[in-house]
Amino acid sequence: MSPVENLRIATRALRANKLRSALTALGIIVGVAAVVCMVSVGAGAQAEVSEKIRTLGANLLLVLPGARNSGGARLESGTQPTLTEEDATAIRRELANVQVAAPLLSRSMPLVALNRNWKTLVAGINADYLIAREWQVIEGRAFNGDETVSAAKVAIVGAVIVDELFDGRTSVGGSIRIGNVPFTVIGVLDKKGLGAAGRSQDDVVFIPLSTAKSRVLGAVHGTTREALDFISVKLADASVRPEAQREIEELLRQRHRIRHDASSDFRIENPADVLTARGAAVRTLGILLIAVAAVSLVVGGISIMNIMLVSVTERTREIGLRMAVGANRRDIRWQFLIEALILALIGGAAGAVLGAVAAVAIAWNAGWPVLISPWAIMIACGFAGLVGVSFGLYPAQKAARLDPIAALRFE
């Protein structure tokens, strides 16, 4: 008997019991959908984490002020103003593994442009900060040396500021007021999206650090105008991070005259560590869910075997009749194998579509990129077909071994 004829007979047998066939394929549908969904969601989450790490800037370390003690209690990090612009200059000048060391001083302040106002983060920086963060100015220009030294009233704004204060139109050359001080917008930053803390990195205004100290922010921490929020250190290569971190710590301890037995009045962090840990957690969860989905596929395979055994019992007389008119055991075996394979492949196809739709919905709600892997779909469907053949083999063998005479007499 030709394969086409076997396929036609198997299809007709499955169509005769549509509901039972659909319920049998349901386990495969759930398993394949779960595999495709979890692989796609995991890939999207990893891509989102990678993008956030990229927007932080490559090979970046943050040097943050220490914590102050008050009444015997240790306050939060940054409450002890211990970092200065001279510290940043020393790090950049004396350490060979450091490309730039960019100080930053910031505070949330109100902005006014024409008849609009907006409150956002105003940060005082020098030109090195944009290099450290790999931030591009897409309109206008960055600060020049004279503006940084002379405390010029110029500003570089993020995309959110352009939308909120200038209706998305070109803002270069426009004026904004930060607090009570007028500034001229000289540049617009490229979009960076959400940061690691979930806050938009585009909702920011950068002004020269000297301007921030003398005209706008002043003594933010209530102690000295020299205190910084943090120093961004861009390294020459990621492989030197441990050595560079040790060198920065030694240099700053020496500059701050800290005794050997005393703890540092600052701390050094890799901002990508949190995101990397988050990516590892997502990857581990994805593997766990894929393992659960694989169990669902196996359960679906057992369901196929169960139904095929029932089908063999129900169609014993049919099998005997087919053998009596010339069908051999191989034809009978192939008929039932093809039925099991069709159930598995239909379940695999439906599961792939369902998994892709679920992955798109989850990624859209989470704000992740949608990455549906064709390889995941092919592997999941291939595994579903393998499950169908594996669990359909025993019922097919049982049907092929029936004695034709006993089969014809079966009631």
Image (spheres, helix red, strand yellow):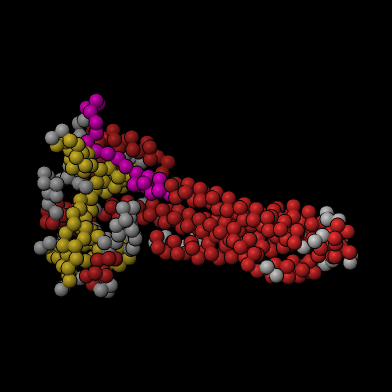
Name the residue located 21 percent from the left edge and 58 percent from the top edge.
121
Q: Is residue 71 above or below residue 144?
A: above
**How many marks on residues?**
0
Left or right placement of residue 137 versus residue 116 in this view: right
Left or right placement of residue 166 versus residue 382 in this view: left
Residue toward you, 379 or 332: 332
Residue 265 among those drawn in magenta: yes
Residue toward you, 320 or 180: 320
Question: What is the quadrant of residue 308 in the picture?
Answer: bottom right
Name the residue located 74 percent from the left edge and 55 percent from the top edge.
395
Residue toward you, 209 or 392: 392
* Observer able to see residue 329: no
Q: Is residue 212 above or below residue 269?
A: below
Name the residue located 29 percent from the left edge and 47 percent from the top edge.
232
Which quadrant would the C terminus be assigned to in this image? Answer: bottom right
- Per the rendered image, the range of residues in magenta is 259-279
Residue 392 among those drawn in magenta: no
